[in-house]
Amino acid sequence: MALSIFNVILFLRYGWLFGAQDFQFHLQRIEELYQNSQHFNFFPSIATFAFNQNGSAVMSMYPKLPLYLFAACRLVIRQPIISYYIGIILMTFIGVTAYFSYLSIEQGKTIGAYTFAVAYMMSGLLINTNFTAADLGISFSLLFLPLVLAGLYHWLTSNHYKMLTVGISLICLSHVLNFIFVIVTLVLLTIINFKKVTKNKLINLVKAIVLTVLVTSSFWLPAYSFGTSVKMASPQKFPLAGINLPKYLFLTLTNSTWSSISIVALLGLILGFVFYRTLPKYLKQILWISIFYIVVISNIFPWYLLQDTKISIIQFTWRFLIFPQCFLILIFSYCLNDIIQRFSKKNVRRLVFSVFILVFLVLSLHSQFRITHFEINAPEVASPLTKDQNLQYKDGIVWFKATNSYEYQNILGFIGTKDYYPKNTLPVFDKIGYPEHHAFINNTAITVPTKNKAGSNQSDISFHSSHTASIELPFVIYNHHYQIKLDSKKIPLNISKHQLLLIKNVKAGTHTVHVQYKNNAITIAVALMTVAGFIAIIYVPKKHHSV
């Protein structure tokens, strides 16, 4: 736990939040879950407290597992800035799974296990993912990558499949793209080891797949329900290009990595070849898989040819470097363990090990210093964000800081993220967003202001009409699982051409519309599937030869 605190020590020194690429997006997700949790709804389907408060399905279209830790910290601590850093500390501590994953393969080699856990969780790559990218989904999924690797090892060697199931499920509930990348990598490693795959192992693999489908239903089932209801705006696309290997090598050597492997991973690559003959077979395999990824995602491969294909969903080829990062640090830890054990004197072994731990700490401090030094002079978020007054950028990186709770709340204002809004809603996105929340009159450009009172999966929208009219309210409708009340009287659901809530023939005066999303079929199905999956994972039969 002390090392987990050390991993954020320079940020805690200021007690401020600093800008990062996806920071506003994830803070709004945390806020939505936090507010819903206070209403005892732990699985919000739509956004009513955040994301412009207009019913976006973003809470269903992205996995929510990482949010629960931060929402829980907020519920206990209340102070939003400190609670966020406590969440980061606890998230880093969860990385202890790397220690036990290593030991499950290399039993008794505690030096290697400790080295792996510390070097992996305190690497510049993870620190930058936390504080430069602020992509909590990626950060959380990285915690469980060692668990997946260990699970695959145990499935191939002893036909035990539940560790693999748990690891893959946790990654799926954290980050969709990393889940896809993990599946691709597992397929590659399985093909390499196809001679070890027997009929019984295939049967247990099918069991693992079924259990994964069950326990991850809280994500994919609501996402499928919303995703098949309307045509949605996809996440932003970026030019697909391979990485420049000399540039990324420089970033690694200077510990300036954001999207490259760390210095320790590079040492793992070198030691992997130096001690290649003595490496176990599985380490040799992941060494070559690491090299394969590094070469394939470089600009040697013509990635631009795939720009208009489904593969462009990966956005950045450097995302695959999470595997060389994990695999090469594992190799480094194995080699370091063997090197240290060659010293006959216990005190010398302790000294060498301590020096390496100290180096990891220094590298962590350096990564933290670079980020805080860049952001320290950034402007404060002094007023609520609007479409005309949004977050600032410097050198292509989001540049701001929040020094107190008031400024934190300002970050939760307008957000320009249009992911998974209905495509028909995009032309009026700015009008229905925070803080205006305009309603449209009689299918024209004429608007009236509204006031929103958010609830859990529901909202009360008040407005005034000067004459009888049809009102297009600033609330997105995806399907027919909504209940509508006008001035406390239930009315039929109507959807406008912009995929917004339409109230027809409203008389002149002030009115309040209550809209609530409720899909009982999905809720019951998720509950049954999740419980069944958990029971199946926990259950150990008397003859448990292959779990």
Image (cartoon, rainbow, N blue to C red):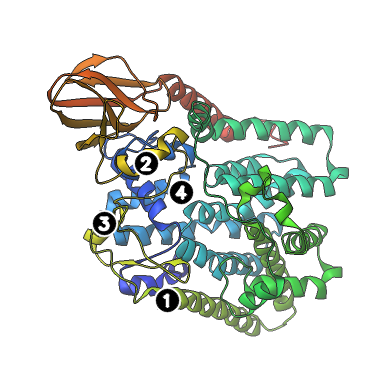
| Three-letter amino acid code at the position of disc 2 | Phe
The residue at which mark 4 appears reads as 66
Q: Which mark is residue 186?
A: none
Q: CA distance from mark 1 to mark 3?
A: 22 Å
Which is more N-terminal, label 2 or label 3?
Answer: 3
Direction from residue 169 to residue 199 in the image, left or right: right
The residue at which mark 1 appears reads as 374
The residue at which mark 3 appears reads as 410
Front position in the image: 364 or 257: 257
- For label 3, the SS is helix
Question: Mark 2 against mark 1, which lies toward the viewer?
Answer: 2
- For label 2, the SS is helix
Residue 170, how many percent across, how many down? 55, 44
Which is more N-terminal, label 1 or label 2?
Answer: 1
| Three-letter amino acid code at the position of disc 3 | Asn
Front position in the image: 481 or 157: 481
The residue at which mark 2 appears reads as 429
- For label 1, the SS is helix
Q: Which residue occupies 68% across, 52% down?
A: 149
Question: Mark 4 against mark 1, which lies toward the viewer?
Answer: 1
| Three-letter amino acid code at the position of disc 1 | Phe
- For label 4, the SS is helix
4 and 1 marks in contact (CB < 8 Å): no
Q: Residues within 10 Å of mark 1 (few under 14, many from 20)?
A: some
Q: CA distance from mark 4 to mark 2?
A: 28 Å
Q: Quadrant of residue 291?
A: bottom right
Q: Which residue is farthest left? A: 509
Q: Residues within 10 Å of mark 3 (few under 14, many from 20)?
A: some
Quarter of the image for the C terminus: give it.
top right
